[in-house]
Image (cartoon, rainbow, N blue to C red):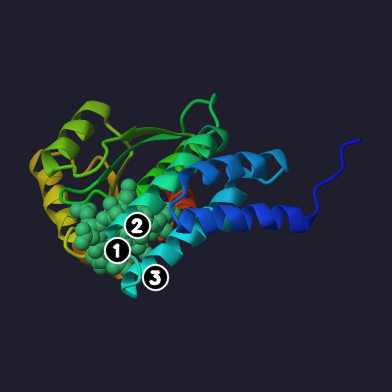
Amino acid sequence: MITKPTQDEIDAVLDGIYEHTLNGQAEPVVALTEQALALGVEPLGVLFDALIPALEEVGRLFEAGEYFVPEMLVAAKAMQGAMGILKPLIAKTGAKPVGTFVMGTVKGDIHDIGKDLCNIMLEGGGFELIDLGVNVPPEVFVEAVRQHKPDFVGMSAFLTTTIPMFRPTMDALAAAGLREGVKIFVGGAPVTQEYADQIGADGYAPNASVLVRKCKEMLGRA
Ligand code: B12
């Protein structure tokens, strides 16, 4: 007889994912992610109730001087292992894309977890996604816009020292005559709506789900 898992069992697995991500142990994170799914936890539940809170805590510990770059790195790798399982489940396939989105982390910045999360949610929301990766210089954004003619360009940055790259990238698109045809979104931990307005971006979103909603609204598809 198959018995329904109790909330305590589910919580124990999610707590395990949180703890092992925090400690950078990729193998148990992957195993427990599979276990959570087998217990019926939604992929987005694993993401928002265990993985993201763990990474937020990693950031807090780094800020407090209790964690250093190696600890951040192994925690990020542990999360990415789980993302490999969750991504195909979150990103639905099939229907004609609602729009095209070119995404990249700006030059000088190698943070990609937040960007990848946006990518997954955008794909799940029906967008065709072109990911330029990390440390992307303005000319690569320009070439991608020329080639793919997207509806949106997204620039991600996680450092106060790299958000100043948004502006030169937008200027490069304008110089190439491509600025008018696309809506530009900026985001990443230090970015705010105020900053986005200040540099003349078309949009900002604090997280991936708001980004998907705003893009659909702009296309009149919400
Ligand atoms: C993991 C991590 C790393 C990993 C990155 C691994 C990887 N593959 O990404 C490693 C160890 C490599 C790393 C390196 C560094 N890091 Co780091 N890192 C982090 C950490 C702990 C988590 C970042 C993360 O992935 N968060 C999880 C995601 C899900 O975050 P999120 O913000 O919720 O994402 C959402 C939004 O931002 C938004 N979004 C994201 N992108 C976009 C794009 C668009 C267009 C839109 C609309 C929205 C959007 O949607 C996302 C999904 O919902 C943060 C701490 C923090 N609190 O952010 C520090 C942090 C970003 N790092 C920091 C620092 C200082 C560094 C280093 C300089 C450290 C060093 N001395 O070497 C280097 C820089 C390397 C470089 N050149 O880029 C600082 C930055 C401080 C600052 N204000 O500039 C932080 C804030 C830590 C801290 N509290 O001090 N880091």
Sequence-wise, the earlier of marks 2 and 3 is 3
Give the class, few, some or many, for how many residues have Cα within 10 Å of label 2's Cα (few <14, many ≥20): many
Q: Please give the name of the residue rendered at 68% of the width and 56% of the height, measured from the top-left corner.
A: 12
Q: Residue furthest bottom?
A: 64
| 3 or 1: mark nearer the eye | 1
Determine the residue positioned at 34% across, 57% down: 72
Q: Residue at x 62, y 54 (%)?
A: 14
Local SS, label 2: helix
Taking the image in four quarters, ligand 1 sits in the one at bottom left
154 or 11: nearer the viewer: 11
Is ligand 1 less than 8 Å from the beta carbon at label 2? yes
- Amino acid carrying label 2: it is Met
Left or right, residue 115 beside residue 210: left
Number of marks in the rendered image: 3
For the N terminus, the image quarter is top right
Look at the numbered disc 1 and give the secondary structure of its residue.
loop
Question: What x and y, as percent, mark residue 171?
Answer: 11, 50
Marks 1,2: beta carbons within 8 A: yes
Q: Residue furthest left?
A: 175
What residue sits right under mark 2 in the picture? 72
Disc 3 residue: CB within 8 Å of ligand 1: yes
* Measured Cα–Cα span from mark 3 to mark 1: 11 Å
Q: CA distance from mark 2 to mark 3?
A: 11 Å
| Residue highlighted by disc 1 | 68
The image quarter in which residue 180 lies: top left
The residue at which mark 3 appears reads as 60
Q: Secondary structure at mark 3?
A: helix
Graded by Cα atoms within 10 Å as few (under 14), some (14 to 19) or many (20 or more), the crowding at tag 1 reads some
State the image coordinates of residue 54 (x, y, percent, origin top left): 48, 60
